[in-house]
Amino acid sequence: MASPRLILDGEDLPETALTATAEDQKRVTRYEDNSCLNALKEKCCSKACIRSRLPIVEWLPKYRLRDLQCDIIAGLTVGVMVVPQALAYANVAELPPQYGLYASFMGVFVYCLLGTSKDVTVGPTAVMCLMVAEYSRHGDPNYAILLALLSGIIQIIMGFLDLGFVVNFISVPVISGFTSAAAITITVSQLKDLFGLKDIPREFFERIYTICEKLPETKPWDACMGLSCIVVLSILKYMKDYDYKDEKYNYVPPKWQRGCRNFIWLIGTEDTVTLTGPIVGGLPPFAVPSFSTVENNVTVGFDKMMENLSTGIIVIPLIGYLENIAIAKTFARRNKYKIDPSQELIALGFANVISSFAASLPVTGSFSRSAVNCASGVRTTLAGVFTGGIVLLALAFLTNWFYYIPKPALAAIIITAVLGMIDFSIVRKLWKVKKLDLLPLLVSFVVSFFGLEYGILAGVGVSIIFILQAAAMPRIEIFGRKGSTRKCVVIDCSHIFLIDYTTTQGFIQILEEFKRFDSKLHFAEVHPKIRRILIAAGIDESIIFPTVDAATNAFYDPDRELEEDNQSDFCMTFL
């Protein structure tokens, strides 16, 4: 028989060491006392955890010169696009134009370190800026900056708690209704610049009424330029998506022709042009966001600002994450790579938090810029560094050149860009697939005109009501011959993944009621975990069946003769 051995802190002591010294005993005690701490360190500081939470560690050692070349091209291309977009979206957010640029560089730097999608570019978007306008208190940047900070904190917490599944409660019809209403709201908000009108209120219906009332005051040259830009942009967008059918006719276009096509594609993809008016140049001060502001010469504290932000603190982080994860999943499927939804939430959260220190409004992934990034051949998230570099150069040296761009041209291009967000085709699809899904779409669409956050909440509420109604009132199918006095109910449990003690007691009470009326209750397609719970609660194993057909057939006893000719058996199935 082998002598026992003593192992301390990974050291295998000789067989002769049959007793531990006092020092060894202290080491054992210290190790046992720190077992929880060691487990936490192993979970949070392991190589796998570092690679998961810091994706740059995974791809940077494999980085090559060819990857750098592709990232530079993609980053510069997106940078040229993001500068005019940022200025335009600041106008949508009703903030000074430089704040759009402030939101366009720090986020891409942070996402380069933490993001898992090589194609996504982070920055201001039309929907996010429109929602910021709802809470920025008539263009107060302090509200927008604080909203970026709070949104980022909430997103980080949700990411570490793996709460990204919350957006699954926002169904596709709700999203479609919300985005369509947002597109119409943005379009109406730009009509004042398109026609050169002044003193237009912010509320949607009042804005429409006032615009119609002031149409005679339209400036002819503004309207002519704006409408002309809409026509030109519509033609460019058509040419961008035009199929030249080169493969069909085995035609290989020369380089100059391919270059012209690529130029038309890039111009057609560009969503906005630069904004008119003076723009504050230089980099923003890197400082902690202000927790107070001044309204009408009165200082407003943090508690009052939180009250004014109200539901925006919850809605904007969710909408931002929803936009970002939808874009990331789209390009991940297209380019065949995997993303980590929780890490995307963390990356977006840190992008918002750190950007708020650079006077940024809330940011998220942009589909148009991500599409250009992907088409430009991006290899890694390092392309965002070059995109951010272009924005910094624009802030430092180019702001004076943005002064003379006409506002009607800007308004026309914003309108042309966001009208593509209106999805008419989904109405026809829902009518064919499930007409009832039109209700949350309609509710979300209509209520959004009274407040975008209310549209999302109302749509989600209707969707949850549908789910609860289906769970509380399952559909029942009855089949058999008429004249039955004995019945069997089969409950299809294929969609039941979790039950508690209260549920099992409810089943037992129902079983007792069935026995009173000489009827039976069978359970079908029960998951193994649910089966064990039912049996442990005292439900007879003989009434649990693998399939609905088996549960139904088990009710019919071929050896049993009916007492009366007009008496037969019925079976009802809960689906």
Image (spheres, rainbow, N blue to C red):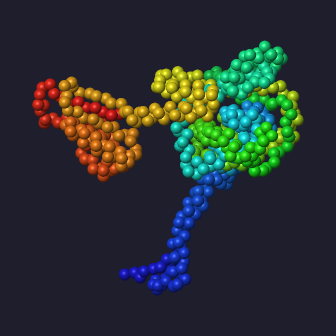
Given residues 165 and 376, the one toward you in this image is 165
Q: Please give the name of the residue rendered at 63% of the width and 32% of the height, measured from the top-left corner.
A: 452
Q: Please give the name of the residue rendered at 53% of the width and 43% of the height, measured from the top-left corner.
A: 165
Q: Please give the name of the residue rendered at 51% of the width and 76% of the height, measured from the top-left corner.
A: 28
In percent of width and height, residue 91 lies at: 76, 32
In percent of width and height, residue 563 lies at: 11, 31
In percent of width and height, residue 142 lies at: 75, 42
Given residues 540 and 68, the one toward you in this image is 540
Q: Report whether residue 460 is seen.
A: yes
**Residue 559: which quarter of the image?**
top left
Above or below residue 150? Residue 417 is above
Above or below residue 119? Residue 54 is below
Tell me: 293 left or right of 27: right
Q: Report whether residue 239 is seen.
A: no
Q: Please give the name of the residue rendered at 57% of the width and 29% of the height, measured from the top-left corner.
A: 444
Given residues 365 and 471, the one toward you in this image is 471
